[in-house]
Amino acid sequence: VQLQASGGGVVQAGGSLRLSCIPSKGSVSHHDMGWFRQAPGKGREFVAGIRWSADTLYADSVKGRFTISRDHHKNTMYLQMSSLKPEDTAVYYCARDRQRLRVGGCPRGGALYAYWGQGTLVTVSS
């Protein structure tokens, strides 16, 4: 399974971007999926997750500014980012669980996800 992430770019602080992630196979509605990011010189961190049940969760740092969603018919997961800050600058990765309709697990942890996209760079200028 390959994940195609897109939508990154350069935006001024306060601006918005929408990231997209399309898996090469399998429905976005049947697997837990998430977004992670890695800033220069830092480790990877959880940003947002959406479970196959449609439950969503967010890192405290993005809560209220970012929205994760999916479109079943387009088989695409999104991350709508608003009120962007320079500290949001990072490479953003989408990820997907291998197991369908998983019960339990920790979407905030990278170990849940078997498949990762190539990353898309988001740069927020001050």
Image (tube, rainbow, N blue to C red):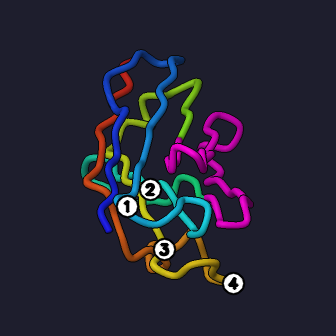
Over which residues does the magenta segment extend? 50-78
For disc 4, the marked residue is: 103
Quadrant position of the N terminus in the picture: bottom left
Residue at image position (37%, 47%) is 92
Which label was assigned to residue 44? 1
* Residue 98 image point, x, y percent: 45, 78
* Residue 3 found in image quarter: bottom left
**Marks 4 and 1, the one that precedes in the sequence:** 1
**Marks 2 and 3, the one that precedes in the sequence:** 2
- The residue mark sitting in front, 4 or 1, is 4
Which label was assigned to residue 97? 3
Which label was assigned to residue 56? none
Type of residue at label 3?
Answer: Asp
Residue at image position (51%, 73%) is 109
Reply above or below: 29 against 99.
above
Left or right side of 119 for 58? right
